Amino acid sequence: MKKKLLVVALITVLATGMLFAQGTKEQAGSQGPLEITFWSLFTGGDGEFFDAMVKEFNASQDQIVMKNDMVKFDNYYTKLTTALAAKTAPDVVVIHQGNLLNYVPSGSLLPLDSYFDAATLNDFQAAPLDACKFDGKLYSIPFDVHPIVMYYNKDLMAAAGITKVPQSAQEIIDASLAVKKATGKWGTAIDNTTGVYKAYTLTRMFISMLAQQGGSLLTDDASAPNFNNAYGEKALVWMQDLVHKYQVNPTELDYDAAMNTFKLGDAAFYFNGVWATGTLEQQAGLNFGAAPLPPIMGGQAAWAGSHTLAIPVQKNQDPARVEAAVTFIKWMTSHGEMWAKAGHIPTRKSVAQKDAMKALPYRADYAAAAAFALPTPRTPAWEEIYGTLSDKLEYAVTKNQNPKAALADMDKTVRDIIASY
């Protein structure tokens, strides 16, 4: 049976087996504020910043009260899928841009075009906003963009006589060799081994470097792989050479180890998502900078995720609750400088011009990356493709697999995955 049929069957079973109430949805008295609800998947530092924003939204006016309930990430999409199928979801939900395709075709999300005027929509960066549109209709609003960026250790660069941040593939190699020779430290810290976390950084780098050459991971219609070519080979060989030919990047380096290697000053260049910023700036004595992912392969492009805010379709859609939800979304996105404290890049252009945003260290240095952030390929097979490619790239890089053989194997695997949906 096709996987999509199994998914539909699972959703049906879950929806009939348990319904998740929206919480208290009655006005607090005829003159009181309207209470609306939100499920948050944000925890840790992200959660603290988000909760602070909700608190400030509630304090900013007396017409709406947002009740924010946190749901553990591991359970979030299971619970959300069930509630959306039963049409009992909260008034506002967060959905990663890459997961929208799981909900838009089923009619679970309310089209938002009529609720946002042209001036408001024009204030958003075009790339993340367009990624929320399907068949010309807008189904969610991008709250942030969190692309992969490059962090660099200023002290190690200075010790090696490097006066400018390297940009090209060869410049990064040369700078890494210089750091290793002058200090004995690692040039780059790209995690390439599954430990506490899959080696997603390899896939994010691979996707970015394909696009920087004018290529793409999948075809335009996402019906087939598109990387078993010269673009894919050039990107893969560069990541392999850092480990094996030039020996400037450790092998068997998992996500936490890569983070700690850079945090402790043992690597000059570190590639991760912008969410690492908050952790890195708490490290005493770490003199670092942050920049958009360099045009390693020539062009500007960077893998990116995006948290988006959407309004579910309900059994009995209350126009007043929808308007309140829209008000909440507009307020949250227009106060993105508060969310940027977590490291994310706000999507509204006006936020980037705020003094409070400009005053934040590091964020302004990589904010330009929002303009060339890559959207997630539109295929229901994406999560399986993403995870499987990370495992395949881990093997190809750490074992220095023949690149042509590695790409051919990855190509066949992705074709098989797509065909199963």
Image (spheres, rainbow, N blue to C red):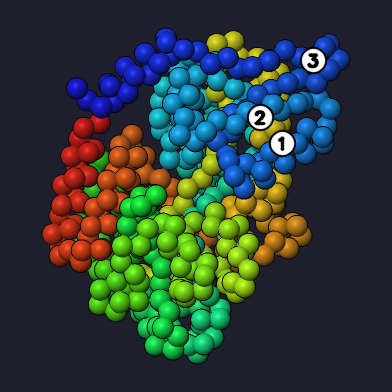
Q: Amino acid at mark 1?
A: Val
User: Quick one: label 1, few (<14), some, or many (20+) residues within 10 Å?
Assistant: some
Query: Of helix, strand and loop, which one carries label 2?
Result: strand
Q: Amino acid at mark 3?
A: Ala
**Mark 2 and mark 3 residues within 8 Å of each other at the beta carbon:** no
Question: Residue 152, percent across and down?
Answer: 51, 72
Residue at image coords 33%, 40%:
382
Q: Give me the disc on residue 28.
A: 3
Q: Position of residue 400 (x, y in %)?
A: 20, 66
The residue identified by callout 1 is 54
How many other residues sit within 10 Å of disc 3, few (<14), some (14-19) or many (≥20)? few
Could you give the CA–CA distance between mark 2 and mark 1, rounded to whole angstroms?
Answer: 8 Å
Which residue is at the far right? 31
Q: CA distance from mark 2 to mark 3?
A: 16 Å
Label 3: state its secondary structure: loop
Check whether the beta carbons of the residues at disc 2 and disc 1 lie within 8 A of each other: yes
The residue carrying mark 2 is: 68
Residue at (69, 38) in percent of width and height? 51
Residue at 63% from the left image edge and 68% from the top image edge: 284
Residue 150 visible at all: no
